[in-house]
Image (tube, coloured by chain):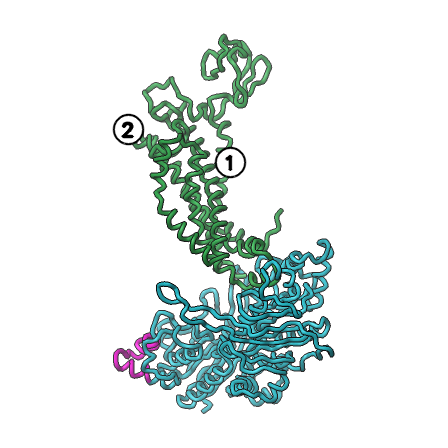
Chain colours: A green, B cyan
Amino acid sequence: MMRLNPINRRRLDNFRANKRGYWSLWLFGVLFFASLFAELIANDRPLLVQYQGELYWPVVQDYSETRFGGEFETLADFKDPYIQDLIHNQGQGWILWPAVRYSFDTINYDLSVPAPSPPSTDNWLGTDDQGRDVLARVIYGFRVSVLFALVLTLASSVVGVVAGAVQGYYGGKVDLLFQRFIEIWSGLPVLFLLIILSSLVQPNFWWLLGIMLLFSWMNLVDVVRAEFLRGRNLEYVRAARALGLGNRLIMFRHILPNAMVATLTFMPFIFNGSLVTLTALDFLGFGLPPGSASLGELVAQGKSNLHAPWLGITAFFALAIMLTLLIFIGEAVRDAFDSRKLKL
Amino acid sequence: MSETLVEVSHLSVRFEQDGQAIDAVRDISFNIPRGQTLALVGESGSGKSVTALSMLRLLPYPRASHPGGSIRYQGEDLLQADEPRLRQIRGDRIGVIFQEPMTSLNPLHTLEKQIGETLLLHKGLSGIQARRRILELLTLVGLPDPASRLGSYPHELSGGQRQRVMIAMALANEPELLIADEPTTALDVTIQEQILELLARLQQQLGMAILLITHDLNIVRRHAHRVCVMYQGEIVEQASTEALFAAPEHAYTRRLLDAEPSGTPAEPPAEPQDIISTNNLRIWFPVKKGLLQRVTEHIKAVDGVSLQLSRGQTLGVVGESGSGKTTLGLAILRLIRSEGDILLEGKSIQGLAQKQIKPLRRQLQVVFQDPYGSLSPRMPISDIINEGLEVHGIGENAAAREQLIIDVLQEVGLDPASRHRYPHEFSGGQRQRVAIARALVLKPRLIILDEPTSALDRTVQKQIVELLRELQRRHRLSYIFISHDLAVVRALSHQLLVMKQGKVVEQGPAARIFEQPEQEYTRQLLKAAFR
């Protein structure tokens, strides 16, 4: 196990002391970890099939119908009663389904009512207006949102910390020019850029990430810069310079840990912000490509199908729970780094 | 005269944190007679300030508590008094002066408002009446030209002037007891004396009692009637001032009295060998004004200092705050830009780029004033010491470096087994030893000591001075010793350089200057320091 210095140990204790935040972290962690295996939870293919004494893994491998005694060379559709019949009777086998028998893009054709259909034993949270299972879409949408926010937060933190560090540490002209650049850059309208861009290219996950990154790195620059401005005059930094340490080593070893306090405190909130931004873009239709699972698209569906309240309610709770958990975690992190509670 | 004003009996103060109880003050008793000065003396952490603050119930309750005892102010127990009654007493019957005149005045209020507030609260004075009283008070505390100062803000005043304003505030309602918590520690020596004389004069005029809290025995000797010596939360000795200084009874008191840095500097090597010299060194900060940011004038932090130091010797640099001592040290280290030549062993280091300086840093080391600030709180001390070794490639492998660290810790008198601990686990004196070890491990020729003892208690100061002297003898080190504390400087320096407002007032062999100062300013400094 990593050897923690006493300050960090105290912080960890402080974090744990905030019960709400601590449990939120666990809950969120479990949800996120589970969603990483969404294919095993919600899928239109069985996890495991036994046919004539042999095991098949439709989740990871494609099988044609002929493998199970069908007639066509096409991909086996395990929801088809004909195939199911073949496996059960002819093959003396069985099928192991995931908990939700729909993937995010599976269209349920045998709905008893026109889509959107209300919750049923088959579609636990109902279907959307294209007959797709809402629960499956929430699970996949959650995964995409969190991954997007995670990558964006990490990337923009790295860029922001580096930019803030350089500005704060060197100060003077570097600082002045960089500050003016940031002022101009932050004046660019992000949303318009995205709208213009989405007419030029089909924005996918990485496109969106790149564009958002161009603007979101500025969040942290100010705090990190202030921290470095202060840090470069600390006596132990001066002592390190007198020892002959190079600039990079001083920045990394002596000042960065101070700046990390501010960074880590901000991170959960930046994370929340990125999440909401992606949802908003999806809601407006400038986000992920059509058909992909996204919470924003679900919100939009809820709005346009007010007669199907399960859409709006699901979207609301999915977002509300996720964001609330993250805020609780953020508060706990903030408490943990609060220097007033760290009297050593 | 000796009627008792405040009677503290069996007072205890306990702090609770994370379920742990710390007894800051244990069962102390003393009396403050009307119109006299009682001094509470002790080192930092001995419970002096806590005692004073509990008299006004200003501790962070409920984290702090009083498991026992009473504080009777004219017979009334302040520990039992309720909040409205306490508010009546605070600032009215009992006034307080705090240590830091920089931070204990509200920076956004004018002097008139600062002092007027307490007059309004306790006396209901406002308008012209209040102004008249404020002027009277400011005249009383000797603030020059008080009428024009009424609209000034604290930052427009010097440290000594601010302390005078603090005193004026404390005296506004003619309190019967004035608590002075280290009233002069943050001030320069010449101003310290003025403030203390002012307090003594005011005491005579107004007949108030003073509870003087200090760690400086010189002040106690001159200004207190009675002394309580505190040690680790207890009063170990209590006597009249004459009796205490004539015949200290407790071992700790004797140690405290004996802690005055003494002795003479180490014998320098016979053949002088130049280690460092500067020629007309200047550090001017430009003041820019106007639209075009034209340089209109310069703040001359260091103005034309020439010095010269031989191997194995110490150059003491003394002066009051703002005289440019520290700036001079940083310039010699090439940590700030300066003009004029700096020669290290005859070679100029002024024009060198930072890369070329780097190898020379090994020979040119520094120990800073604040042992709490100069060690990174995130690294165990072995890493802190190791850092320099790594940068300069000393010691061929980790094991060899470890051995060097163990050796140097032993040399500065620390237990090598403690090297994996973090700075906060050490006391101030021990931390300063770590800082010295960090410099020493590189085997430098010259160490710049920037007020290395000012943040430490007297008894610890003495140990550090002795350590420095011993190290100098053993390694033929040269020191540039920057300090405002002339007693410490005298115990270490061969040469002396007196600075005032960036300029050299007097320089030469230390012994001669201490015996026969030539300049008036030097005489003043010496007079304030040794009496």
Instruction: State which quarter of the image contains the C terminus of chain A.
Output: bottom right
- Residue at mark 1: A33
Dot 1 crowding, Cα within 10 Å, few <14, some 14–19, many 20+: few
Q: Main secondary structure of the magenta part?
A: helix
**Residue type at mark 1?**
Phe
> At 47% from the left edge and 79% from the top edge, which residue is drawn?
B183
Report whether A325 appears left or right of B39: left
Across the whole image, how many numbered discs are drawn on residues?
2
Q: Amino acid at mark 2?
A: His
Chain of the residue under the numbered disc 1 shown in the image: A
Q: Is residue B332 left or right of residue B81?
A: right
Q: Chain of mark 2?
A: A
x 60%, y 77%: residue: B316
Q: Please, is residue A96 above or below residue A25 in the view? A: above
The residue shown at (59%, 73%) is B278
Tell me where the magenta segment starts and ends, as one range.
B111-135
Q: Nearer the viewer, residue B526 or A85?
A: B526
Residue B367 location, x and y as percent? 60, 68
How far is mark 1 from mark 2, CA to CA? 34 Å
For marks 1 and 2 on the same chain, the one whose residue lies earlier in the sequence = 1
| Front one among B23 and B386 | B386
Looking at the picture, does residue B320 appear above or below residue A99?
below
Q: Residue at x 45, y 48 (%)?
A: A330
| Residue B136 percent coordinates (x, y) | 33, 85
Q: Identify residue for label 2.
A: A307
Q: Secondary structure at mark 2?
A: loop
